[in-house]
C-alpha cells in the first residue's frame, strides 16, 4: 500500500478510435511486495516494453468491446496489470473489480480510474469473492501452475448468464517455429513468466476441461502492430483466422457455462 504522500508521474501511451489506453501511473513510493512471487511480478510490470504491450492491449480491448453481449453490470478483470483494460470498461459504464498478484500493478490500476475496486489477489491461493456478469482473464493462464483450477475459480464467480473472456497465447506460431529452427529460443528462459506453453489445440482442451462452451473466438495476428501503424490489417487477420496455429499470436474466447451442445467453433476474422 502507498501513503497519502505518494506521488505519481505519467508516461504517454498510444490511443486510437477503438479504445483509449490511459497513461501508466508510476508510483514513486512503491508498495512493498510480501513475497518473491509478488516481487517478481512487480518487476515484470515495471520492465515490460511499454509501446509493444500497450499496442497489443489496445487491440485486445477493441476486440472484447465488439464481442461483449452486455454493456453494463459487474465486471471482474483478473490479472489487471497496469489497469488499462479495467479503466476502459469502467469508463464505459461497468462496475469494475480488478485483481492482480502484483501490488505495484494494483496501485497503478487504482490510479487509472476512481471507480475501480482493485485488490492484490493470488489467483492460485486466494478466494475470488463476489458474483460478476463479465469476467476477463486476459493473458493470465500461461503464468499459473494449475490453470484448470484457476479458471474454475473464475467460473465460480460468474453470475447466472454471465460471460467469461479468456485470452490465451499461441506459443508455437510460425515466427517462433522458425526461430527455434535457427537455434534462437526466445521463451522459457529464467526470466520468462510463461510456465505453461499453449498451442491453439491446448486452448480447446483447457476450455473443455472446465465445462465451458465457446460462443465466439477472435484472433490477434502474429504481425507486430508497430508494423501496421498500431492497427490490424484485414489480410493479417484473415490469415490468422484461417490458420491460427501458424499465424495467431493469441486467441480471445468468449465463453459461457452449462451448455449441453458440443459445437466446433471456427476462429472468426476480425478484419
Image (cartoon, helix red, strand yellow):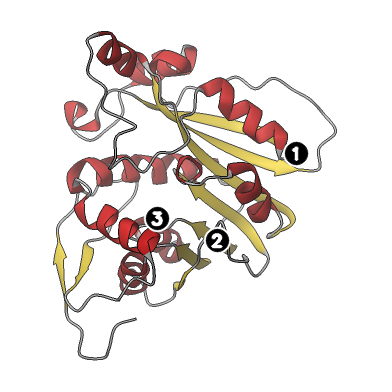
Residue at the extreme right of the image, as rendered: 260
Residue 36 spot, x, y in % from top left: 36, 62
Q: Residue furthest bottom?
A: 4
Side of 154 relative to 192 (left or right): right
* Spatial CA span between label 3 and label 1: 26 Å
Q: Nearer the viewer, residue 19 or 132?
A: 132
Query: In the shown orientation, is residue 3 left or right of residue 200?
Result: left
- Establish if 81 lies above or below 215: below
- The C terminus lies in which quarter of the figure? top left
Q: Which residue is mark 3?
A: 85
Q: Earlier in the sequence, mark 2 or mark 1?
A: 2
* Residue 4, picture quadrant: bottom left
| Viewer-proximal residue among 193 and 138 | 193
Residue matched to label 2: 76
State the SS at label 1: loop
The spot of residue 189 in percent (x, y) is 29, 34
| Residue lying at 31% horizontally and 28% vertically, measured from the top left | 232
The residue that disc 1 covers is: 211
Of the image marks 3 and 1, the number of the one nearer the N terminus: 3
- Residue 8 in view here: yes
Amino acid at each position: 500500500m502507498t501513503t497519502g504522500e505518494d506521488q505519481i508521474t505519467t508516461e504517454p501511451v498510444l490511443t486510437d478510435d477503438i479504445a483509449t489506453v490511459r497513461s501508466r501511473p508510476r508510483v514513486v513510493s512503491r508498495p512493498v511486495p510480501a513475497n518473491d512471487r509478488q516481487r517478481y511480478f512487480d518487476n515484470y510490470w515495471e520492465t515490460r516494453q511499454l509501446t509493444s504491450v500497450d499496442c497489443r492491449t489496445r487491440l485486445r480491448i477493441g476486440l472484447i468491446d465488439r464481442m461483449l453481449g452486455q454493456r453494463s453490470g459487474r465486471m471482474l478483470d483478473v490479472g489487471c496489470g497496469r489497469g488499462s483494460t479495467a479503466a476502459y470498461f469502467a469508463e464505459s459504464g461497468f462496475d469494475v473489480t480488478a485483481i492482480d498478484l502484483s501490488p505495484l500493478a494494483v496501485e497503478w490500476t487504482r490510479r487509472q480510474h476512481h471507480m475501480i475496486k482493485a485488490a492484490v489477489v493470488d489467483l492460485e491461493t486466494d478466494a475470488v469473492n463476489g458474483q460478476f456478469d463479465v469476467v476477463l482473464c486476459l493473458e493470465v493462464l500461461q503464468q499459473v501452475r494449475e490453470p484448470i483450477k484457476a479458471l474454475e475459480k473464475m467460473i465460480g464467480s460468474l453470475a447466472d448468464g454471465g460471460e467469461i473472456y479468456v485470452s490465451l497465447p499461441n506459443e508455437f506460431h510460425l515466427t517462433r517455429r522458425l526461430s527455434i529452427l535457427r537455434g534462437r529460443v526466445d521463451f522459457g528462459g529464467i526470466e520468462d513468466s510463461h510456465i505453461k506453453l499453449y498451442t491453439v489445440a491446448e486452448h480447446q482442451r483447457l476450455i473443455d476441461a472446465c465445462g465451458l462452451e465457446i460462443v465466439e473466438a477472435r484472433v490477434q495476428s502474429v504481425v507486430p502492430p508497430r508494423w501496421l501503424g498500431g492497427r490490424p490489417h484485414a489480410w493479417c487477420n484473415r490469415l490468422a483466422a484461417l490458420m491460427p496455429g501458424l499465424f495467431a499470436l493469441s486467441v480471445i474466447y468468449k465463453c459461457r457455462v452449462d451448455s449441453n451442445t458440443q459445437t466446433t467453433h471456427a476462429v472468426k476474422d476480425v478484419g
